[in-house]
Image: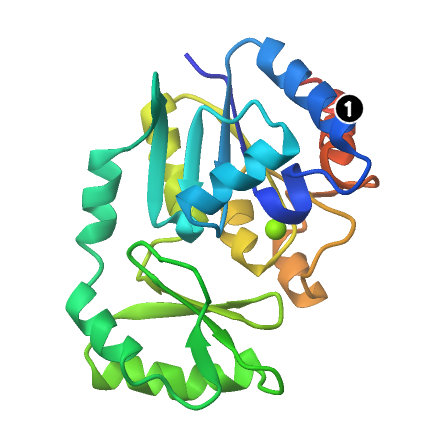
Amino acid sequence: MTSLLLVSDLDGTWLPGPGEASALAVLEAAVASAPDLHLAFATGRTLPAALEGLAAAGSRGPQTLVTDVGCALYLPTADGWREDPAYAASVEARWDGKAAARVLASLPEGILSQPGVTARRRLALQVQPGFDPGERAAPLGALLAAHGLAARILPSHGFYLDVLPVGVDKGFAVRYLQNKLRPCHVISCGDSENDLDLFRAADIALLMPQHHLEDGHLDELAPTLIRCTEPGPRGILAELRRLGHL
Ligand SMILES: [Mg+2]
């Protein structure tokens, strides 16, 4: 039985800043020795990019790795990572790959694919310099409708525009894990717009001090939100200890 499901974003959250590698080691050692704790990471990165980031940080890695803003979920095996087939099928059922390819072939002005990113069951887009992602979401939405692609546009970090299957996001992955691991208490950690769904699905939301969220987003989360006072792994460790989980 798992009593705590800890789900963390990577960039700006679990992955340490310069000079903070030892803080990550301390946090991960404490988490690894906590009984009945399941550690999952939920990132906007693809699997190869997530593994690269974890290796660069010297991370021990999670028990579940959610990539592509919730569009894929991987489990560790003896020789690497294996995609969870049931999860993959549930996302696949919500995604029209052919319509997505048509959208990709006719992107509106100011929007392009994120360079070097092979997105899984989503479109990983970004705006060109000088364009506002909030403003570009409207013509992109019209294009999705024209091609019959039922999807949600999620702007983040001031330039990313992820196009996700309806209902699929980091929170979708949390609910899937909760179902698998129940009963459990969920703590999530994050710093940006694509973590809001992670926060909404959690009992406690740990927000990094250098976050990218506006007050309007945070008001909604007030009952469950805890603002870490220190950045990255140090902040997460301090709050998990204060809450009595480590
Ligand atoms: Mg982040």
Q: Horizontally, is 34 left or right of 163 in the view?
A: right
* Residue 13 appears in the rendering: yes
Name the quadrant of the C terminus. top right
Question: Considering only vertical position in the picture, is 142 above or below 69?
Answer: below
Question: Considering only vertical position in the picture, is 91 above or below 99?
Answer: above
* Residue 149 appears in the rendering: no
Q: Name the quadrant containing residue 140.
A: bottom left
Q: What's the residue at 35%, 57% (across, down)?
A: 119
Q: What's the residue at 33%, 87% (across, down)?
A: 142
Picture coordinates of residue 110 (x, y %)? 49, 87
Q: What's the residue at 35%, 34% (across, down)?
A: 74
Picture coordinates of residue 202 (x, y %)? 53, 39
Q: Between residue 111 and residue 95, name the one nearer to us.
A: 111
Picture coordinates of residue 91 (x, y %)? 25, 50
Name the quadrant of the N terminus. top left
Label 1 belongs to which residue?
242
Q: What's the residue at 43%, 86% (across, down)?
A: 138
